[in-house]
Amino acid sequence: MLKQDSPLLACPVALAWAVLTATLLHADEPTEERVYRHTLRQVSHPEPILADHPEYVAKIEEVPEGRWEAPRLIDDESADLEVRCWRFSYNARGIIEMVNHLDGDKTAVVVVHPWGVDDGSGWVTPEPAGAAFQCTPRKNKLITKHLEEIVNPLLHRLRPTVRLVSFSLPGKEDPTRKRIYRSVRSIPTSLTRSQGEKELSQKLRSFDYTGSALPNEVTLKSSAEMVDYFKSIPGLDANEPYNKQGYWQLPTPVHRAIDVDLSDVVFYDGEGYEILKAFLKSQGVRHVLLAGYNTDMCVCLTTAGYDNLRQDFNVFLIGDGTIATFPGQSSPANATNAAVAFASLKIFITQEGWIRKKSP
């Protein structure tokens, strides 16, 4: 296992070899088996689920089918984290809850797509009709508030305990972001970070964010008027002409509301899941606490999304540490509630207040 101060991290060749070695070792590693007794007990006085931050995610209401308590699934020998969680099962006819004990040294926090849009970094939503991140400047400001109130404090609280904190961003590692963020290949210094941040700011602030407006007139050539109408007046188009050419080639930063430590790792979507998986395995990671944006899209479907991670790791989605897209609504609460509930069919859900230091 590589510690965060390991000399291997300063050498890209050595790190690449370590990642490859870890992958090969884990590929041949025998898996121990045990029998898990799935005995369910009805919860008579259940705790509220996702009731702590109603402005971001609506509370999970009591289901008629019931709430069930299951035995502990994960009980690491050197556990120092207690994580209460739940899932929904139609087959079990209700919500299944349990408390797991995790070894923080085998745990990673992954924040999917905390893009630095409209955060003061210089990268902004194109006007008058462009779209990025939560698609409008007003909605992006809500993400800033969510990061400041929930995600960043949680990262500060967990960073001393977990093996690593990480983020996923679009594209591939480029020279500018390489100077700022640690990756699977290298780790920055305070000096390179300062140089990279100046370079990033210059690139982002020098771009012209003026795009085209929506058309005032639409030619309807079809007998099905809606076909031509929706082609001409899109609900969401984040490409040209509304986002000017070159917009998506700009280096996406981590949002400035997050205090990124030099030891935190950035994974890049364009480099694929296998690199992310190999790196986490090389660090001895077994468990992932997952947060980020957007719950119904990137948090499930991108490189660091749970559809990938749940194949190889024990994944806990932090239900109030994520926000779903919320078209046509002023609040993400109901949309996030629905996206988290859907995720609970595949993975366990926890919440910020349920991730605690384990009592001795």
Image (cartoon, grey):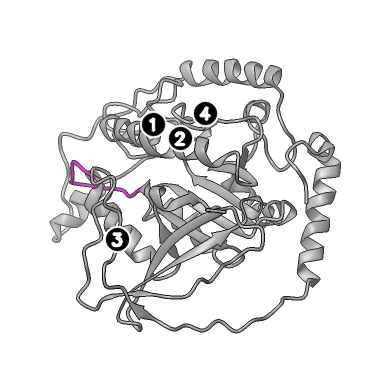
- Earlier-in-chain disc, 4 versus 1: 1
Residue 170's disc number: none
* 4 and 1 marks in contact (CB < 8 Å): no
Q: Secondary structure at mark 2?
A: helix
* 2 and 1 marks in contact (CB < 8 Å): yes
State the residue position of label 3: 47
Residue 148's disc number: 1
Other residues around mark 1 within 10 Å, as few (<14) / some (14–19) / many (≥20): some
Figure quadrant of the C terminus = bottom right
Q: Quadrant of residue 195?
A: top right
State the residue position of label 2: 152
- Where are the magenta residues, as a range? 323-331
Q: Position of residue 334 (x, y in %)?
A: 22, 53
State the residue position of label 4: 259
Q: CA distance from mark 4 to mark 3?
A: 32 Å
Q: Main secondary structure of the magenta part?
A: loop
Q: Position of residue 141 (x, y in %)?
A: 31, 30
